[in-house]
Amino acid sequence: MGPSLVFLGAGNRGLAYARHAHALGARIVAVADPRPERLQAFRQAFHVEHTFRDWREALEKPQLAQAAVVALPDRLHAEAAVALMEKGYHLLLEKPIAPTWEEVERVAQAKARTGRMVAVAHVLRYTPYAQALKRLLGEGAIGEPVSVQHLEPVGHWHYAHSFVRGNWRRERESSPFLLAKSVHDLDWLLFVMPGEVRRVASFGGLFHFRPENRPQGAADRCLFCPEEVERACPFSARRIYLEAYERGERGWPLDVVAYPVTWENLVKALGEGPYGECVYLGRNDVADHQVVMLEYQDGRTASLHADLTAILHRAPGTAGQPGG
């Protein structure tokens, strides 16, 4: 019999982990999420016995499983992780560990105090290409690396979905852009070229998604935008979501906008919720470009450049679609 798991958070990421765990033989015994439709999806897919509308309710029960998966919003990670470890659970903790250094230290102290296992979901290092690259570097295939330059070109529609319209658009409600998105890349850098880092420098900011860059005549919502303006905008919610639905797509990011994914639910969400808003309303404050430079103790260097500005100068109407 496989390990038993409790899931805190039944959103897109929680459901993806649950499917993988279930396929590998794990038993999912409990799930917590405030959305009834998400709880129902877990019940149907995994025959979950215990469901909770608030994750804290699960902590009021005797320990229900061997381990827990923390797929809650970023601001809840530290509180939930510490409480779960003290209850006796081992953890798969979705990245980032927490939005602030003080919270990260609390999690680390709880791990040391309780002796629980904690795996942070830095998934890039486990991909076949990362494992192959690590092996080749270890074999000396290109000699000794002394500097790595890493680029993360965030898809324009992905950035608009998650960091302008989505849950990570405001730092005070989630976490900084680097933690929310590029923590994967920073972990990847330290995976392929490990060592103690002596100095870090970082620069960036919010350059494009500002009210002064709003196209003339744009409406507050894409569904109500004049056709000539909407069709020229690479961030059109109609194109990113509704046209994707018409092509037969039903997974991410559509299932974040509306769940279950139906045409009626999508249209309603785009007409009322944040995913249908113009990206130039100024309701976001996280960076849309940032660079990070690392200097190791032994003199080696690494850099990360994360942005999406390369796509902002495309000809109107030529933007790509979800899936890339």
Image (cartoon, grey):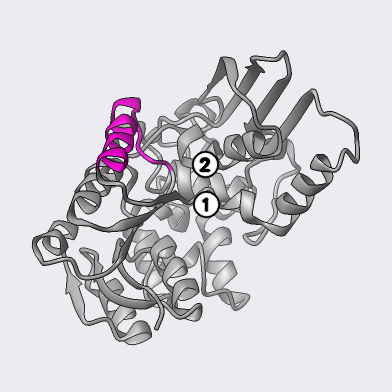
Question: Can the viewer see residue 318 in this picture?
Answer: no
Q: What secondary structure predominates along the stretch shown in magenta?
A: helix
Element on which disc 2 rests: helix
Q: Position of residue 148 (x, y in %)?
A: 76, 28
Amino acid marked by disc 1: Pro
Amino acid marked by disc 2: Lys
How far apart in space, not on screen, are marks 1 and 2 (Cα)?
A: 32 Å
- Marks 1 and 2, the one that precedes in the sequence: 2
Q: Position of residue 307 (x, y in %)?
A: 63, 33
Q: Position of residue 182 (x, y in %)?
A: 56, 38
Task: Tell me if 139 is positioned left or right of 230 in this view.
Answer: right
Question: Can the viewer see residue 147 in this picture?
Answer: yes
Q: Which mark is residue 181?
A: 2
Q: Residue at x 57, y 74 (%)?
A: 249
Residue 202: which quarter of the image? top right
- Within 10 Å of the Cα at label 2, are there few (<14), some (14-19), or many (20+) other Cα atoms? many
Q: Residue at x 28, y 34 (%)?
A: 109
Q: Residue at x 44, y 46 (%)?
A: 95
Q: Looking at the picture, does residue 323 appear above or below residue 180?
A: below
Element on which disc 1 rests: loop
Tags 1 and 2 in contact by the CB under 8 Å rule?
no
Q: Which residues are magenta?
A: 96-113
Identity of the residue furthest to the left in this view: 60
Q: Looking at the picture, does residue 277 appear above or below residue 313?
A: below
Residue 292: which quarter of the image? top right
Q: Nearer the viewer, mark 1 or mark 2?
A: 2
Check disc 1 and report the residue beneath it: 226
Identity of the residue furthest to the right in this view: 142
